[in-house]
Amino acid sequence: MVPLSAYVAVSAVLFTTGVIGVLIRRNFIIVLMAVEIMLNAANLNLVAFSHYLDSMAGQIVALFVIAIAGGEAAVGLAIIIVVFRGKISTNVDEMNLLKW
Amino acid sequence: MSNEAVPLNYVPILVFLVVAVGFGLVTLLAGRVLRPSRPYKAKLKAYESGSPLFSDARLQFPIRYYIIAMLFVIFDVEIVFMFPWAVEFRKLGLLGLLEMGFFIGILLVGFWYAWKKGALEWD
Amino acid sequence: MTFTLTLSGADLLLLLPEMLLTVWLCVVLTMDFAMPRLPKDRLAYLSVAGLAGVLANLVWFDLAGIGGTLFAHMFVVDRLAVFFKIFIVGTTILVILASVDYVRRFRFFKGEYYFLVLMSALGMMFMASANDLLSVFITLEFSTFGFYVLVAYLRDDVASNEAGLKFFILGVFAAGLLAYGISLVYGETGKLVFSDIASPSATPGLVIGFLLIFAALGFKIGAVPFHSWIPDTYHGAPTPVTAFLSIAPKGAAFAILIRMFFVSLAAFKPAWVLLLVGASILSMTYGNIVAIAQRNIKRLLAYSGIAQIGNILIGLAAGTKMGGDAILFYLLTYLFANLGAFAIVIAVGNLIRSDEIEDYNGLNRRSPFLAFAMLVFLLSLAGVPPLAGFIGKLYIFLAAIDEGLYTLIAVGLINIVISMYYYLVVVKKMYINEPTDPSPLTISPPMKVVVYAGLAGTLFLGIYPQPAINWVVAATLMFSNLAGPAAAAPTLVLPIGG
């Protein structure tokens, strides 16, 4: 048996990777991928907890997270394409029309 | 199987991995050591019947392609809800069937919309 | 563990408003693409008709006291949920009416606009009923998806695209935080329903998990330090979408926050009061100070919105039943005043194609009605008696006094003074400055309906607040057992108006 702490550790590493990716990468596509990593970290946690706690609920949540991540990717790519047509760039730093 | 981090049944896979990676590395290294090195310009050109290149391959794809890809992402993910439903189909009974029908009905409205708007046409 | 699926007619009744709206939005979408020659304005009125039906249904629920839970307690219908649903549906009706003129300017996808607004409204209605962490996640994302598209709706406008992208990136980042927070809370408790996860001991996983969930909801309401998307998104989005975004999702998110803090976390009140006091002080101060420097009316209202959220957080920090009442009442006053102010911005923007505050110079000469309505809305937002905003702020402060949060009240009072300044700058421009172009402005009938509704609500809640107070007091009755002196006195008699 792989101990629960191993799953939680991997998931924490994945989540941190995702957060760092969102914060430091400048390309929208990569930022989107980093968010997907964060969601998958949550999924790993949920499924591992679900197994060790012997409760189905976690796996159900994971299924919904997967579906929502799919929808997120579709909406995000659509918005990126619209922006891309206007600006021919997918770089976060070139988004400067509206001041922060 | 008590307190083993890696079950014994997986050892062959580990051995296989080592052999596979080792084989690749050894072949490439041996080739590099043994082959004569005589570079000249024609070697960099496209091989045999390939045509010489005339522009960068990283051009923009037609937007249509993205729309099909995104529709695929949206509709294929919904399958995730059908697997658990199919597994427990008998227990869920008629009510489960109706609920899945309602779910698919809503999806079909979206599909109908995409179809009517011409998102599924190639030209 | 096995699930049994049973649904009776009585259970389905609880879902009736949502089912009506689901069917209705499918009808609106189908009519849009199946009947391409139908004028798109008709779709707006069709949507409003559907929403009016849903509203009637909800009012019946509220009067008849219909309630219960569904789907293993995932979905709850109680007075609180019904209050927030009425709030959301009412906002949506007014936003759609305020959109009609604006949507005429779109070149493409006019019909889908109404569909997306209805879809977001449906998501937010589910948010109001969310009673466990899974439904919080699904409903939050569901309602936000529509907004991602709506914010980026002006395809040829680079500012709108950029706003949509920024909103999207921060929105999905918040979704990632939320999902991970939920996984940690689930790991610590093995449960998802709010009342089940009320754990007596604060383990590290639970603390981090709830902090992440709070951060995600903080993004949603735009409380400092999670506010960075607000000004840009509000500025770039189509103005009716900005109006919608500034009100309805805030209400829905407060429904979840109230349930989470008052039910799941009631045992840790001393800890989260500090957190909320901090967020509230930061939001009020930051929003009001930065608002002073704004030249664009949409950005001004964005920062003033951040400050208003800070005010509402005072009620949450009080953590009593009376605090809950005050939040609900404040949201009502905020709905009428903010939506009214945005309606004026939409109307003026449609006529002169500008959102700069400079262009409001001499509005009184050009349209006395618009200028007067804007004056009322801005003064209500500032909290001047006898308007609704005054009673809202008073209610919130009274709830905080009961809990002894005197620092918070002092900061809140100072902020009222600061906010008065920038609201009055706009008023001065409208009434004292000379217009550059003195041609009169007239507004369309649907827009007039929205402005009159805003005026009526703002004046009524300010002059005769007792019916609304009775309503919000009844909506939060389930929290009467919360600690605090207000629990002993569930009805509030205000010094004026009552």
Image (cartoon, coloured by chain):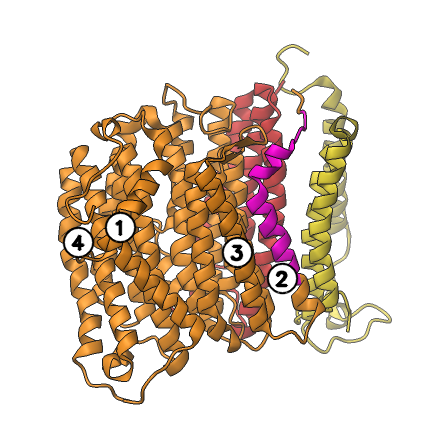
Q: Quadrant of residue C231?
A: bottom left
Which residue is at the far top?
A: B2
Counting residues from the N terminus, which is met first, the one under dot 4 or under dot 1?
1
Magenta-drawn stretch, dominant element (helix, strand or loop): helix
Secondary structure under tag 4 reads: helix
Q: Is residue A50 visible?
A: yes
Counting residues from the N terminus, which is met first, the one under dot 1 or under dot 2?
2
Do the dots labelled 1 and 2 sit on one chain? yes
Residue at the image point whose x is 75% and y is 43% from the top: B101
* Residue bearing the label numbered 2: C28
Identify residue type, mark 3.
Answer: Leu
Do the dots labelled 3 and 4 sit on one chain? yes
What's the distance in space between the residues labelled 1 and 2, CA to CA?
A: 39 Å
Determine the colour of chain C: orange
In depth, the one of C456 and C27 nearer the eye is C456
* Residue bearing the label numbered 4: C415
Mark linked to residue C51: 3
Could you tell me which chain the residue with mark 3 belongs to? C
Which residue is at the far right?
A: B49
Q: Residues within 10 Å of mark 1 (few under 14, many from 20)?
A: many
Q: Which residues are magenta?
A: C4-29
What's the distance in space between the residues labelled 4 and 1, CA to CA?
A: 10 Å
Could you tell me which chain the residue with mark 2 belongs to? C
Could you tell me which chain the residue with mark 4 belongs to? C
Counting residues from the N terminus, which is met first, the one under dot 2 or under dot 4?
2
Identify residue type, mark 2.
Answer: Val
> Do the residues bearing badges 1 and 3 touch, measured as CB atoms within 8 Å?
no
